[in-house]
Amino acid sequence: MREIDALQQSIAQKQTSAGDQARNSLTADQKAKLKALDDIRKSMPAIDQATALNLLAPQGPAMHGPGMMRGPGGFAPEGFRRPGQPRQPN
């Protein structure tokens, strides 16, 4: 168990180091854009909550069916047959 903990700690340290190196290689403009992205990411829970409360309109296309894809039943795009479904004449 100690070996697994040591490996996890080592991986976490290497990930932190790689992230630090990547950020240090950015230009000032890239760093500013990255900060703006991070600020937006931090506000996402509030945006999701406001959308769930219908205070904000959802972004993107409307969801269709349980599979959230086009077509009856929502599991396959228009034009795709499901098993056991007869072919449609063209």
Image: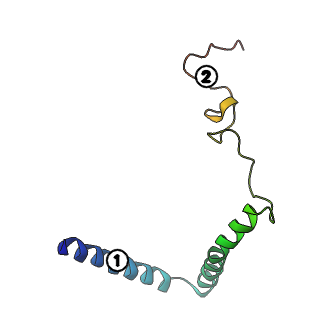
Q: Which mark is residue 66?
A: none
Q: Secondary structure at mark 2?
A: loop
Horizontal placement of 30 versus 13: left or right? right
Type of the residue with mark 1 = Ala
Q: In this view, which residue lies farthest toward the front? A: 53
Q: Tell me the residue at 63%/39% (across/down).
A: 66
Q: Which residue is mark 1?
A: 12
Type of the residue with mark 2 = Arg
Q: Tell me the residue at 54%/20% (across/down).
A: 83
Q: Quadrant of the N terminus?
A: bottom left
Horizontal placement of 63 versus 41: left or right? right
Q: Nearer the viewer, residue 55 or 71?
A: 55
Q: Which mark is residue 81?
A: 2
Q: Position of residue 43 (x, y in %)?
A: 67, 76
Q: Position of residue 46 (x, y in %)?
A: 69, 73
Q: Residues within 10 Å of mark 1 (few under 14, many from 20)?
A: few
Q: Position of residue 80 (x, y in %)?
A: 62, 26
What whole-number distance in Å separates the C-alpha atoms at marks 1 and 2?
47 Å
Q: Quadrant of the C terminus?
A: top right
Q: Position of residue 78 (x, y in %)?
A: 69, 29
Q: Nearer the viewer, residue 47 or 59?
A: 47
Q: Secondary structure at mark 1?
A: helix
Please tell me in which quadrant of the rendered image residue 55 appears. Answer: bottom right
- Looking at the image, is mark 1 or mark 2 earlier in the sequence? 1
Q: Nearer the viewer, residue 27 or 56?
A: 56
